[in-house]
Image: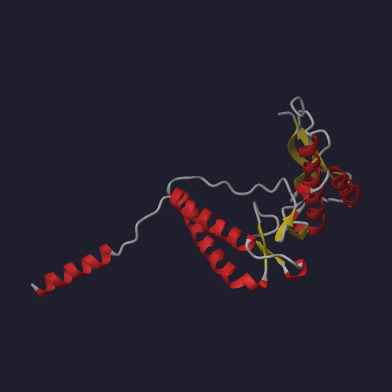
């Protein structure tokens, strides 16, 4: 009888304390609520001297969507706690999506953009991150005039010995199209990665503001990269 009592007691403890499983939507709502708390904490912290603030970054520079926040030493402990909670909910959301059969596509590295803010500002007594998308067309055109010659120099100096190991990056054009830039990851050329990302983001800012008619534009699809006369040449094909 005593053994039966112990078994029942253990069963109640084990099964009674089992955590309730949450759906992906439920985890998502918890993560969103925590992000809103982070935004409120930052917005409620007065910004008088921007030199006291710094940019918190999470994620690799060329990942799908790096995260950035303005942070201040006075809120560091609260921020760190909220951010840890957010990451827990966000990661649980991802796991729940996978458990529910959702297929999460990996990031495709063909299009490089500059996600990071270009500066910090105090606006209306609040710390704000300023992005390229907020610049005027003239400002982006001026930056492109500086960046593009470096891309041309990269292409002029590019050499190859075989067709192996080459991939490409996409460069936005002025006419809603794009071109393909040969690139070899083994070379680890972070400078050209940064230049192409900056160029694309400034070009996208111009296109978004000028809104050209892109309905009739047709692009060629990437086919291969062939080493011809010591230079990597991109081959394209029609869709």
Tally the marks: 0
Q: Is the residue 6 above or below the residue 114 in the image?
A: below
Q: Can you say which quadrant of the picture contains the N terminus?
A: bottom left
Q: Position of residue 166 (x, y in %)?
A: 76, 49
**Residue found farthest to the top:** 216
Q: Residue furthest left?
A: 1
| Residue nearer the viewer, 8 or 136 | 136
Which residue is nearer to you in this view: 16 or 139? 139
- The quarter of the picture where the C terminus appears is top right
Q: Is residue 219 above or below residue 158?
A: above
Query: In percent of the image, x 62 and y 70: which residue is there?
Result: 75
Q: State the image coordinates of residue 178 (x, y, percent, origin top left).
A: 79, 38
In the rendered image, the residue lying farthest to the front is 124
* Residue at the image point whose x is 83% and y is 51% from the top: 161
Residue 217 x, y percent position in the rendering: 77, 28
Closer-to-camera residue (73/31): 73
Q: Quadrant of residue 218?
A: top right
């Amino acid at each position: 009888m005593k053994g039966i009592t112990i078994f029942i007691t253990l069963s109640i403890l084990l099964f009674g304390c089992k955590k309730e499983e949450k759906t992906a939507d439920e985890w998502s709502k918890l993560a969103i609520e925590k992000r809103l708390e982070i935004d409120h904490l930052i917005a409620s912290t007065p910004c008088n001297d921007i030199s006291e603030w710094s940019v918190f970054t999470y994620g690799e520079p060329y990942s799908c969507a790096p995260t950035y926040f303005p942070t201040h030493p006075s809120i560091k402990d609260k921020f760190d706690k909220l951010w840890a909670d957010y990451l827990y909910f966000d990661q649980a959301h991802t796991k729940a999506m996978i458990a529910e059969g959702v297929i999460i596509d990996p990031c495709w590295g063909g299009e490089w953009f500059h996600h990071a803010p270009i500066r910090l500002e105090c606006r209306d007594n609040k710390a704000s991150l300023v992005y390229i998308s907020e610049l005027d067309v003239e400002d982006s055109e001026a930056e492109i005039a500086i960046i593009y010659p470096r891309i041309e120099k990269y292409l002029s100096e590019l050499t190859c010995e075989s067709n192996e190991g080459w991939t490409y990056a996409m460069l936005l054009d002025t006419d809603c199209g794009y071109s393909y830039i040969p690139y070899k990851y083994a070379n680890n050329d972070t400078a050209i990665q940064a230049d192409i990302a900056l160029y694309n983001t400034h070009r996208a800012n111009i296109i978004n503001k000028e809104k050209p008619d892109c309905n009739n534009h047709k692009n060629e699809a990437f086919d291969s990269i062939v080493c011809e006369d010591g230079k990597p040449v991109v081959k394209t094909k029609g869709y």
